[in-house]
Each structure stands twice: as structure tokens, then as C-alpha cells.
Image (spheres, grey):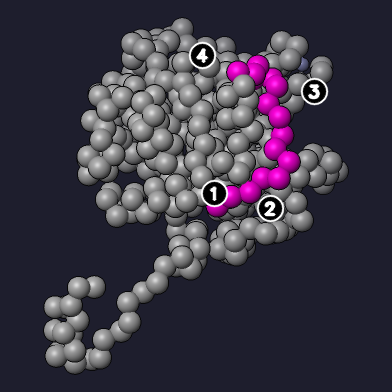
Amino acid sequence: MKKYKLICRSCGYELTSDGYRCPQCGGILRTVYELSDRERLRKAILDAKSFWDYIDFFPVEEGTEIISLGEGNTPLTEASILADRLGIKKLLLKNEGCNPSGTFKDRCMSISFTKARELHAKGVVIGSAGNAGAAAAAYGARSGLPCNVMLPSDSLDTRKALIQHYGARLIPVEGSVTDCIDLISEVYEEFGWHNVTTAAAYNPFQADAEKAIAYEMAKAMDLKVPDWIIVPIGGGGILTGIYQGYKDLLELGLIDHLPRMIGAQEAGCAPLVNAFREGRDPKDIERVKDPHGVAAAIADAFPLDGETALRAIYESKGLAETAEDQEILEAQSELGRYEGIFAETASAATVAVLKKLLKDGRISPEESVACIISGNGVKELPMLAEGMSFPPSVKNDVDALRSRLSSES
Ligand SMILES: *Cc1c(COP(=O)(O)O)cnc(C)c1O
Ligand SMILES: [Zn+2]
């Protein structure tokens, strides 16, 4: 028996072989796993030491050649200094910045490229704000599959450089990420590419990658669950995946309740938060017209996995909130200063939202919170340097040095 089924979310059709979309109605596919062999699967989770040790929960055939760069298994650190400053008892940071190309997208691409190879792809294409593109480029290099990356032309040069560094073909597009993804759907079949865009609508296989974040966190916490998990939302895939991971753990009896999920967005691009505030149905999220703000990695005008993410938020009695640019930059700085973590702005949005929710009492100081630090700030280093001023240099002279050291600054 196959360990997973691909089922259409719209019409319920069950696929008999792997595919990217429903052959009946074109609907979005989801994977459903057979978890009845509880003892074996519990043991598989508890014994796992690396990302691919969770293969029972990934849509990949046994025996497939795995395309890996050592993704996953990232640290979960207790941020005690920052917690003290914010006035909360327990704050945990899951540092996905430690992945090979600096974001959790490496998990998605490891599965995507493994699957693309299994399905005999000749090449792949992706639409991305830069992070999934960089991850795809790296795994493209690792797998030997030609990789085409489309990203908004106004993306930072550091993001473009990284993609090109890994040898992928870079195609800057005069538009948003959402526009890139729309364009790809018009051409990928014509060119025989597999679409590895990190949204279930285009690539249902990568959607299980983030479940492992939940498995790793639960194990690092001796199978306890934080009261809240704050996740940045771009497309909504990572929040959906982490929540599904916790649901698997609950179904297998490894934990006894689910965490409450919080989606964090940038004030200049908050389609999911807008829908949450108005209490809308998850199907009725509206595209934002003029996405803007500092956190480029989550500037999705329309969250392609927003429906499942908002459903997870409602179901877990969670929340969704925004942060302004200034609040995000301040949180980014605090993560560096007090915890030694260089978070991308998109990831710092989680801490900015936490501060807001503590202030207005929606989170209590007695509760435990885990923030998902989804990416490493290094790709935004030029932006960080631009916003700083540095002290003047001292003469190469010990008296000059003494005088500087005894002065205030
Ligand atoms: C992609 C990305 C996100 C958002 O993930 P989604 O699955 O699109 O919601 C958040 N942070 C970083 C650093 C990312 O690269
Ligand atoms: Zn269908």
C-alpha cells in the first residue's frame, strides 16, 4: 500500500499516480498519509536524527535518490534575554536561518527536486521573492537539473547574486512575485519544466516539508507544545505545514494538544490579516493592490496557501496581526543584540507581532511562545549596513586609542 494519497481539494478525486493538479477539475491537490501503523511511525519520528529520517511523512517513493544539502534539524533556542526584556516567561526561537541557503525553503526544495527527479523532469522553474529561488538554484546545482528562477526585478541584488552564484538562469520580471507565478503557469508545460514554486496549487509535493519543523520542535521540547507559535506569512505554506505537522503528532499520540497558530504579516501587505480581522471565510481572502514594505520575502499580494493557513488559524483559536516596517526593523535589531541571531526582516516580523500582542494583552506573560525565524538576514546585509552609521576610525596610536576608550562612545 502506498503511504500517501493525492486527493483533489475541490472535487475529492483521488489520483492513481503522481500529478501536480487534479486531472478531473484542475483543482489543488493535498497529500493524505496512512498513519494507522502507529507504533512504527511514532518510533520513526522519535528516532529521526535528520530531515530525511522523516521520509515516512514525505511524498517520495522508498529507494528514490534523495537530493539533499543537509537541510533541516535547525536549532530551537530559548531566548531568555529577549524574553526578559519583552516580559514573557518563555520565548523560543526556531532558527531556520541555519539551513544551507539560509531559509526553510531548503526543506521544500530538497523534496521538490527529489520528486522532480523521481518523475523524470528535464528542468524546473520557480517564481519567488528570492529565497525559494535561491534554494531552488542550490538544489538545482546539487541535482544537476537546469533551474529557471523568475523574481521581481526590483529585488535586492544580493538575492539575484545568490541565485546566479548557484548557476541557475535568472529571469527578473517587471512585476510582483504573484505576477511571476501567474506568468509561469502560462509557459511551464510548453518548455517541459516542473514547477517547483512553493505553493500547493503548483507543487503539492513540497507542502509536506514544513511538517518536519513541528516534529523537530516537539522533540526539542520533550514532546511539550508551546502555547502559541508565531509564523511569518507570505503565501501561507509554512504556517499550514507546521500546523499539519502538529496534527500528525497529535494523531499519533505523541502530544496531547495543538498549539495556537499566529500569522504575522507586514502592514504594507497583509491580505490574510485583513481577512482575519473581518472574520472572512478562508476562501475569501482578497489580493492586495499595492504590496509594499521592508519584508520582501513575505510581500505576496495574494497568499496562495492562505486558505489553508487561515483555516489553521481559525481552527487553533489563533490570531493574525501585522507589524509596521519600523517595528520589524527594531525587532530584527533586538534579535541580533540580545540573542545573537541575524534574522531576515520577514522573520523578525514574528517578534514584532509578539511585542504587539503582549502589549495589548492578547498574549499573557505567563504563556510560552515560539517564533519561527524563517530566514537568515545575511541576504539583507547591504540594507542593514545602509541604515547604520559607524564610529570614526582612531589613529594607529596607543594614546589615541586610550583617549577613545575612555570617551563615552
Ligand atoms: C518564503 C518565506 C516566508 C513565507 O513563507 P510562506 O510559506 O510563503 O508563507 C517567510 N520567511 C522567509 C524568510 C521566507 O523565505
Ligand atoms: Zn478535482
Label 3 sits on a secondary structure element that is: loop
Amino acid beneath label 1: Ala
Amino acid beneath label 2: Leu
Label 2 sits on a secondary structure element that is: strand
Which residue is pictured at 40% across the width and 13% down the height? 250
Nearer the observer: mark 1 or 2; the answer is 1
Whether the residue under disc 3 has CB within 8 Å of ligand 2: yes
Nearer the observer: mark 2 or 4; the answer is 4
How packed is label 3: few (under 14 Cα within 10 Å), some, or many (20 or more)? some
> Mark 1 sits on what residue?
295
Marks 4 and 1 close (CB-CB < 8 Å) = no
Horizontal and vertical percent position of residue 341:
34, 51
Q: Nearer the viewer, residue 196 or 325?
A: 325
Which residue is pictured at 39% across the width and 47% down the height? 331
Q: Which residues are magenta?
A: 279-294
Say how many tags the image has. Answer: 4
Q: Is residue 404 visible?
A: yes
Any mark on residue 26, and which?
Answer: 3
Q: Is residue 373 left or right of residue 337?
A: right
How packed is label 1: few (under 14 Cα within 10 Å), some, or many (20 or more)? many
Q: Is residue 327 left or right of residue 291?
A: left
Amino acid beneath label 3: Gly
In which quadrant will I find the C terminus? bottom left
Any mark on residue 151, and which?
Answer: 2
> Mark 4 sits on what residue?
315
Which residue is pictured at 26% across the width and 32% down the height? 88
